Amino acid sequence: MREIRVFTDQPLTTGEEVTLDAISSRHLATVLRLKSGDPVSLFNGQGGEFLATLGECSSKRVTASVARFTDTERESPLHIHLGIGMSRGDRMDWLIQKATEVGVTEITPLYTERTEVKLKGERAEKKVRHWQQICISACEQSYRNRIPIIHSPITIDQWLRTVEADKKLVLHHRSDHNIRELGTQQAASAALLIGPEGGLSSQEIKLAEDARFTSLTLGPRVLRTETAPVVAISILQSLWGDFL
């Protein structure tokens, strides 16, 4: 039986029993059809994970007895903050899921000149919660023990003014510089800016460069907005993170 990993946002202590939330309970009991006595691994985003055994197990309520703690750490030494122009439909969902799997640390959805998605108030809050749940599911699947942060959407100029990183990079397919040129440099953190469908405007590229972002291309082909972040993050992980 494969290892079942479950995130919970509550404190975890060896020897105590915890009640899992409704989403996890329904998934474990109804989708995976687990039973009382089955083993699971619990993590709460604070590092490490706990072996646990299911107690009560129904679609409405699942409890788990917390046992041995393992201080396993699978986070990359490279802190990556992705600023991404919001996309329509399920493209953002897919992007967030895959970016989480390859090790992104923070994601800030951005309003840009060509962003067609408009989120305000309660609708924006609901969408951020939805994206955070996608992060959680991706961490459960990919064996990450820490959950990336999904920030509330802001304008591109707000993000450019406030983001901090050793290396600040903006993808621009017409740039004369290739991302492989970063190979001789060192960094512990990177801010990565990528536009929505249609890309960033010339003015936005200039704003980024004025904010000390380096324009880079991934190569001769133009990648979709949901593909480019996964490729770029993977390259950065290979250069400065934990990809072999």
Image: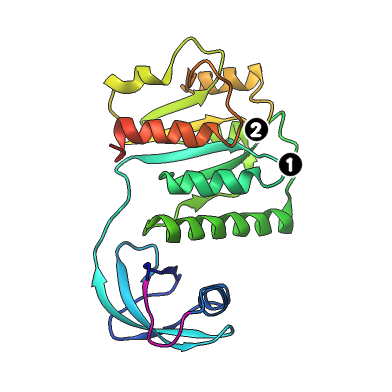
217 in the magenta segment: no
Q: Which residue is mark 1?
A: 117
Camera-side residue of 174 and 243: 243
Would you place residue 144 above or below residue 22 in this image?
above
Residue drawn 71% across the image and 34% down it: 115
Residue drawn 52% across the image and 19% down it: 209
Q: What main secondary structure does the magenta stretch of the protein show?
A: loop
Q: Which residues are magenta?
A: 34-41
Q: CB atoms at circles 1 and 2 under 8 Å apart?
A: yes
**Label 1 to label 2, Cα distance in Å?**
10 Å
Amino acid type of the residue that numbered disc 1 sits on in the rendered structure: Val
Residue 155: name its quadrant: top right
Camera-side residue of 96 and 160: 96
Q: How crowded is the residue under tag 2: few (<14 C-alpha within 10 Å), some, or many (20+)?
A: many
Position of residue 120 measured from the top left corner of the image (x, y, whole percent): 73, 50
- Does residue 28 show up? yes
Position of residue 188 measured from the top left corner of the image (x, y, whole percent): 31, 36
Amino acid type of the residue that numbered disc 2 sits on in the rendered structure: Pro
- Does residue 164 show up? no
Position of 134 compared to 188: left or right? right
Position of residue 163 measured from the top left corner of the image (x, y, whole percent): 48, 36
